[in-house]
Every structure is written in structure tokens, then in C-alpha cells.
Image (cartoon, helix red, strand yellow):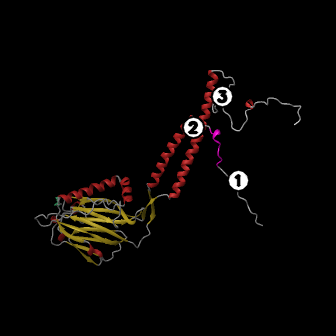
Amino acid sequence: MLRRRHVNVKTVKELDAFPKVPEPYVDKTAVGGTFSIFTILIIVYLIIAETSYYLDSRLQFKFEPDTDFDAKLRINIDVTVAMPCSRIGADILDSTNEPRIHLDSLKEEDTWWELTSEQRAHFEALKSMNSYLREEYHAIHELLWKSNQVTLYGEMPQRSHKPDYAPNACRVYGSLNLNKVAGNFHITAGKSLSVPHGHIHISAFMTDRDYNFTHRINRFSFGGPSPGIVHPLEGDEKIADNNMMLYQYFVEVVPTDIRTLLSASKTYQYSVKDHQRPIDHHKGSHGIPGIFFKYDMSALKIKVTQDRNSIFQFLVKLCATVGGIFVTSGLIKSVVQSSWYVVTCKLIHFGKKTDHGLSVPSQPINYQPPNTINLLDVTAPERIDIMQPQ
Ligand SMILES: *[C@@H]1O[C@H](CO)[C@@H](O)[C@H](O)[C@H]1NC(C)=O
């Protein structure tokens, strides 16, 4: 049987967890007031701090094995060598030894080694920017990732005027899609020719004395354009003082997935070690003069995620903080206030003798609890006739 319940105001009142203390019982003191001001200041400060912490998200870095084997590795190259294009050959080989069908997209263009003043300014800016980023890696990097700014410096400006001598340099540039395996990109003397087990460079009509592997790296990156990735090789310039120089760059490519609040991208970072030596067969320094970039893929990838609490978590945290501060300051206030009473009490004892010895400073002298009858104030009836029956 269903009994009808009367939920009236009284029942609800019984459940009130916040009983109201009548005003006369509330005792306001200077100590309490001081504490309230401090508490409010601390709470305001914490609210501001928490809010700015919530709005400013953090980056998290995680390492994972890279299982994305089928993906292609895009390499972007723009290197200028101080030799005319007819004398050099650029080539990429990877460890799969697949026929190089993509190489058409790597262009060669005759140019001049000397840069115009605008181009020089651009290159110097790129150089100093990259070295700064390398040193101040973390501080700037995070900012760039969050800002979603892809490049700080755009393309090298076009040459405004052409020198009146024949081009003396070659710009090798382009983007290639490669297999995600180790490989090597190189620029050596002579045109390359494919043979069944690799390729050879034919340099028939030139002598060693024509070699000059002085070079400038404008772009050397992997993957698509992505904010905040530092390409340590960009802005690199090497002046050869010997015809038979061998430059080697050992590049370790690290796949990097970046997921920020604004964008998500899969890209690659790399670190590089470089080495150079002159080739001199008489002195036991063997090899082929040229510029070699040997790259290898890292087995681990870096996952960068931008992390932010939900608004709900933020509110809960805020309430907990404010409530905690409130309760704690109340506790501290009580302790301070009680010890204050103890101290003042003692002082009174030592100072002058009081009649009752006990002072209760928390209550005003003529304090009267409400709704009580002060019996002293009750006047007796003027005449009580006890004989008279009522
Ligand atoms: C190579 O060319 C650069 C730029 O023109 C020059 O400074 C350097 O001396 C040359 N090196 C050699 C070995 O000829």
C-alpha cells in the first residue's frame, strides 16, 4: 500500500545542513575581521592564479615505438653548392635499393654563390634564429607549438639583380617522398648513372682542381611544414679551403606527432652530427669528396599533446581550494584567538586583581542572551492577598 507522504516545509527545514545562527550569538571581533581580510585576499589571489593556470595549457611529451612503417618520409632539400650544375650530381639512395623513380622532382638550377644583400640578410636571420632555437630549445619551442606559427622566416627572397658573370653555383632543391628507412642523399662531382647494383658518378671532363664543395643549406627538413620544429641544418654554410673536401652529416630522424588545441600534425624532427675532412689518398684519408647526408629513422616517436583540464574539473578544483582556505583560516583564527585570550587573561592576573579573577572578553559586559527573563528586573506584584480565594 502506498502511503501518501506529506512533505511540508517543516520536514524540509529539518534537513537543513546550514542552520542559521541568530544574529545576537554571532560575535564579531577584530582578530576575526583581520583574518577575514587576509582570507579574502588569499582566495582572490588563488582564484586568479588557478584561472590563469587553467587557461595556460601544458605540453606533454611521450615516447612510443613508431609502428607507422608504411608511411612515406618526405624530405625537403634546398642546398647551394659553389660549382656549376654541369659538374655535380645529386642523388638519394635508401637501404631498400628501389629504383629512384622520384628523383625528377629534385631540381637543379644554375645560380651564383654570392648572395644579394637582402638574401644575405635573410640567410643570416635564419642562421641566428636556428642557433637561438637550438640553445633556448624548450622555452621558445613550446610557444611556437602553441602559437601554431609555421615558419618564422619564409622563402629566401628572389635575386633582385643578376651578376654580369656566368653562374658559378648550383642550387639543388625539391621535395621527395621516400621510404621510411635509412638512406643517404649526396652531392658529388659528375653526373650520376644508374647501374644494376647502385649507381656511379661520371666525372670525366673535370680535374680535382675544379672541385669546390663549399655549400650553403637553406632547407633541410623532413615531413610537411609544421609549427615549432627546429631544423638544425638550416642556415648552415661551409666554406671549403681544399678542393677534396668530404662533408658528412649524420642525421637521426625522429617522428613527432603534435596535437595542440589548434591543430594536429605528423612531422619529423632530427638531430645531426657533422664531420668534415679533406680526402688525401697519400695520407690515408680515403673516400670520395662531396657532401653526404646520411639519415636514419628513430625507432621511437615523440607524441606531443597539449593538455587542458575540463571546465568541470577546473570548477571542482576552484571550490576545493576556496573551501579549504576558508576552513583552514577559520582553524588558525580560533587558535590565535584562544591563545590571545590566554595571554590577556594572564596579563590581567599579573597586572591588577580583578574581583572574580576570570574575565570573559568575548562577551560584552552587559550581555544578555535573548528570550531570557532577567529575574532582577521582574518587579514583584504590589500586594498579594493570599487569603482571598481565586
Ligand atoms: C670555393 O668557393 C668559395 C666561394 O666562392 C671560396 O670562398 C673558396 O675559397 C673556394 N674554395 C676552393 C678550395 O677553391
Image quadrant holding the N terminus, namely: bottom right
Distance Cα–Cα, label 3 vs label 1: 41 Å
Does residue 100 appear anywhere in the picture? no
What's under tag 1, amino acid-wise?
A: Lys
Query: Mark 3 sits on what residue?
Result: 359
Instruction: Tell me which numbered mark, 2 or 1, is placed earlier along the sequence.
Output: 1
Judge whether residue 25 is colored magenta: yes
Q: Which residue is identified by label 2?
A: 32
Label 1: few (<14), some or many (≥20) within 10 Å? few
Residue 285 horizontal side relative to residue 35, left or right? left
Answer few, some or many: residues within 10 Å of disc 2's Cα (few below 14, many 20 plus, some between 14 and 19): some
Alpha carbon separation for disc pair 2 and 1: 34 Å
Q: Nearer the viewer, residue 3 or 187?
A: 3
- Secondary structure of the residue carrying numbered label 3: loop
Percent position (x, y) of residue 364? Answer: 63, 31
Mark 1 lies on residue? 10
Residue drawn at x 79%, y 29% is 382
Name the quarter where the C terminus is drawn. Answer: top right
- What's the magenta region? 18-26
Q: Secondary structure at mark 1?
A: helix
Question: Splitting the image into four quadrants, where does ligand 1 fall?
Answer: bottom left
Q: Nearer the viewer, mark 3 or mark 1?
A: 1
